Amino acid sequence: MISSWGGACPDQLSLLGLVFYAYHGVYPEERRLGQRFTVDVHMYGDFRRAAESDDLDQAVNYAAVYEVVRAAVEGEPVRLIEALAERIAREVLSNFPLVSAVEIAVEKPAAPVPGPMETVRAVVRRAR
């Protein structure tokens, strides 16, 4: 199977439904009051060594990924969730050399829109 990452389909490791409280947004109320953000992280790479060795030192430590994502989300506020997703993608790729590509989805369930909705989601896909 060929992936959109440009080769044989890589292995995938995902962290889904990470929830953080942060102060991102265009409007002053969003930056003052804050709100909940949900993040999904899909990481792609060759994770065979971890699978074969059953050794955390050969793997992407998902507890460490969580901390990198938390720091990115709870860090300096941005106006757009697209910018936040980009920040998370950049941080994951720069901190985890086994990860060759990422897909980051950021949701903002309480986004200020003029009607009922479940959530707003921005997705970015980045590769080395």
Image (spheres, helix red, strand yellow):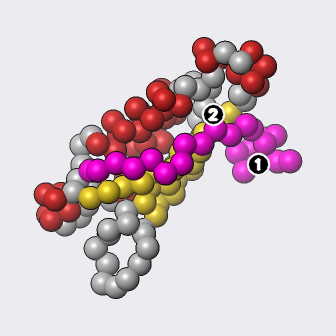
Residue 77 lies in the magenta stretch: no
Q: Residues within 10 Å of mark 2 (few under 14, many from 20)?
A: some
At a point 43% along the width and 73% down the height, the residue shown is 118
Residue type of the residue flagged with mark 1:
Ser
Of 22 and 44, nearer the camera is 22
Main secondary structure type of the part rendered in magenta: strand
At a point 28% along the width and 73% down the height, the residue shown is 112
Mark-to-mark CA distance, 2 and 1:
13 Å
Residue type of the residue flagged with mark 2:
Ser
Determine the residue located farthest toward the right in the rendered image.
Answer: 1
Residue 62 at x, y percent in the picture? 53, 31
Q: Earlier in the sequence, mark 2 or mark 1?
A: 1
Q: Is residue 127 above or below residue 35?
A: above
Residue 2 at x, y percent in the picture? 82, 48
Residue 68, visible in the rendered structure: yes
Is 52 left or right of 111, judged from the image as shown?
A: right
Residue 86, visible in the rendered structure: no
Q: Which residue is mark 2?
A: 100
Q: Residues within 10 Å of mark 1 (few under 14, many from 20)?
A: few
Q: Which residues are magenta?
A: 1-22
Residue 25: name its quadrant: bottom left
At a point 37% along the width and 83% down the height, the residue shown is 116
Q: Which residue is mark 1?
A: 3
Q: Is residue 112 above or below residue 105?
A: below
Secondary structure of residue under mark 1: strand
Secondary structure of residue under mark 2: loop
Residue 8 lies in the magenta stretch: yes
- In the picture, the quarter occupied by the C terminus is top right
